Amino acid sequence: MPQVDQGEGEQMHVKQHLLDREIDSLYNRNDCSCYDYRPHKLSNRKREVMREDIQSLLPLTPTVFHMLLALADGEKHGYGIMRAVEKETQGQMQIRTGSLYGSIRRMIEAGLIAETNERPDPELDDERRRYYGLTDFGRHVLTAESARIARAMAVIKGKHILGGV
């Protein structure tokens, strides 16, 4: 292995730092406007970085997947997410309050969802509720995970695993 002197190592570190800054300037997960995923609008570099970022999150945990799925048709407050997951899984998955809000916090940090400012009519809602919605990035992650699951389902069907179920 070739020896790298101190000057070359420092130059490599500076180049990596500049590359990291360039990638950060290409997009920010929390900035939903940058995830306008029309291929003609994204540079090849930006598309590649986003694809790698999405793939690094897959496979999603069942909880995260079902929470994103619950938000796919619109914003919901925490309790609304819990009810939607329970309903959409026909009661097979129930998210407890403690894990719900921990998951919400982590999903916000990952840029998958965001707290929204839109509120329903105050007469119909408790003002203390916080509403959450998918970011564009979160929608892309949900789409990628759904495609992954669909590919697995095609294999399952091809192998006649489900039979008469």
Image (cartoon, rainbow, N blue to C red):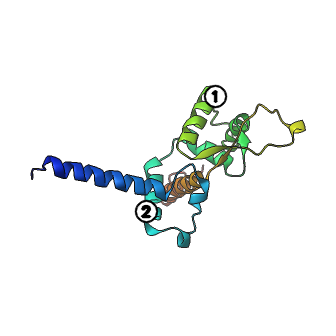
Circle 1 sits on which residue?
Answer: 96
Q: Residue furthest right?
A: 123
User: In this view of the protein, which residue sits in the foreground, 139 or 109?
Assistant: 109
Nearer the viewer's eye, disc 1 or disc 2? 2
Q: Is residue 157 left or right of residue 117?
A: left
Q: Is residue 82 above or below residue 32?
A: above
Residue 4 coordinates in the image, percent (x, y): 13, 50
Element under label 2? helix
Residue most toward the bottom? Answer: 40
Q: Is residue 128 left or right of residue 113?
A: right
Please rate how many residues cluster around mark 1, counting C-alpha atoms within 10 Å: few if below 14, some from 14 to 19, many from 20.
Answer: few
- Could you tell me residue 56's position as x and y percent? 43, 50
Say which residue label 2 marks.
48
* Residue 29 shows up from this direction: yes
The CA span between labels 1 and 2 is 36 Å
Residue at 22%, 48% in the rendered image: 10
Number of disc labels:
2
Q: Quadrant of residue 114?
A: top right
Q: Are marks 1 and 2 in contact (CB under 8 Å)?
A: no
Q: Where's residue 24, x and y in %?
A: 45, 53
Q: Farthest front residue?
A: 7
Residue 159 visible somewhere in the drawing:
no
Give the residue displayed 57% in from the left and 39% down from the top: 63
Amino acid tagged 1: Arg
